[in-house]
Amino acid sequence: MNSEELFLRSKNVVPGGVHSPVRSFASVGGTPIFFSEAKGAYLKSVEGKEFIDYCLSFGPLLFGHRHPEIQEVVEDTVKKAWSFGACEPYSLELAEFITSKIPWAEKIRFVNSGTEAVMSALRVARAATGRSKILKFDGCYHGHLDQLLVKAGSGLAGLSSSDSKGIGPEIIQNTLVLPLDDETALENLFLEQGKDIACLIIEPIPANYGLLPQRSEFLKKCRELTTKYGTLLLFDEVISGFRVSFQGMAGLTGIVPDLVCYGKIIGGGFPVGAYAGKKDLMDLVAPSGPVYQAGTLSANPIGMRAGLKTLTKAWNENPYPELEAKTKRLTSGILKLLVETGDSNWEAVTFGSLFWLKGKTKDPVRTITAIPSDHKSRFAIFFHKLLNQGVYLAPSGYEVGFLSAVHSEEIIEATLNKTKQALKEQK
Ligand SMILES: *Cc1c(COP(=O)(O)O)cnc(C)c1O
């Protein structure tokens, strides 16, 4: 069966045919490709066609698909156990590894997704402060928990409205929303309501509505105001953790959060999330404290060992400088080819091994409102041209691209050759 037939079948039994919306290609049009295998930097479709993968499962695969060293520990684990629902040494090793390398993660709790990590960390923040309100920014994504599926409401600053049906006003009444990149709005909100805000949550490098690097002054202001008002600062490093540097954005900026969430890379491609922070905060979590949080499959041994192997490699091999250089080479190569084919209205935003192609703008784009309005349609055309030639980008102009350590110079060259072919095609 080909992708088209499989998608038709899937739509009969699965909402929209997918288990996560972006996979449906709704944002770029066309039929999603069904993949059956993956290795290194490559995906293989059910039709047997190969694609160079720059989506990488939306970030977890820092060392590409099925890296042999990671595969080995996965296979070894499968021979020993799949799940205990009891104490085991594997999660302890991962917990000790992370807490020994990341000072602000004094204690850590493993869960099964980034969403769960954020949801649990917010519960801790509310318990620790005795406050109810949460402040988030328009342009940051923190998973699909009810209280954070909000966008800025019209009217009063800080007010929010739901971003999804099924989330009533009573659920989001304690969620405040501000635009990114605006210290004045932040100061005013804290002046009004700072003493009621339990937690300020931010992606320190917002990477879910395109890539929106923030000014360090803005991030510093987040730390300064939260400290001043007794609000906890939560860095959502689900994408950026172990990706932009081993210690994530907190490590790069030197801004120390009170709580931090991880996901994606932390499980080496298996479903793992984690929240971590200072001892006194984390000791509020059951069974040592009164904040309930649990999970049948939490600290699953396969994810724990795949995660430990991935993080150990990242720590020992420090792939980050090379990843950054290769990402720059890829994006500057693509831009050059676009210019050569007469389309000079593109630029690349990169940060480490994250990249985002967008239309040229006068100023750097730091808020979602500054994203060019024709972005979605332009990206869709570019996406399909590359897809035809066997280059797989995330199927939405609002998702970032990822490189892995196994995306070699040769693979980048091959990508640029395919891009060249792709741009020769008629629209
Ligand atoms: C992916 C992501 C999440 C959600 O993680 P899931 O594992 O998809 O639930 C939360 N925050 C950020 C910053 C993310 O990129």
Image (cartoon, rainbow, N blue to C red):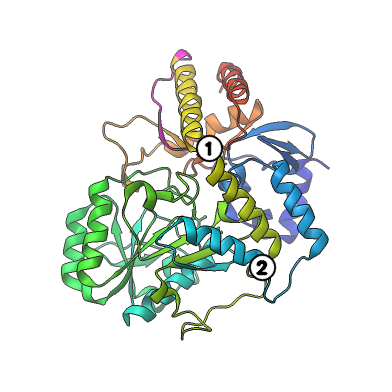
Q: Nearer the viewer, mark 2 or mark 1?
A: 2
Q: Is residue 348 magenta?
A: yes
Q: Which residue is mark 1?
A: 319
Classed neighbour count for the residue bearing mark 1: other residues with Cα under 10 Å, few (<14), some (14–19), many (≥20): many
Instruction: Tell whether label 1 touches label 2 (CB within 8 Å).
Output: no
* Residue 214 percent coordinates (x, y): 31, 46
Answer with mark 2 or mark 1, whichever residue precedes in sequence.
Answer: 2
**Hey, what amino acid is under mark 1?**
Pro
Instruction: Please state the horizontal and vertical placement of residue 318, each as a whole percent of the image.
Output: 51, 40
The part of the image, by quadrant, that contains residue 102 is: bottom left
Answer yes or no: is residue 168 visible: no
Q: Residues within 10 Å of mark 2 (few under 14, many from 20)?
A: few
Q: Which SS class for mark 2?
A: helix
What residue does disc 2 label?
89
Quadrant where the N terminus sits is top right
The residue segment tinted magenta is 340-354
Could you tell me residue 252's position as x and y percent?
37, 46
Q: How many marks?
A: 2
- Is 392 within the magenta? no
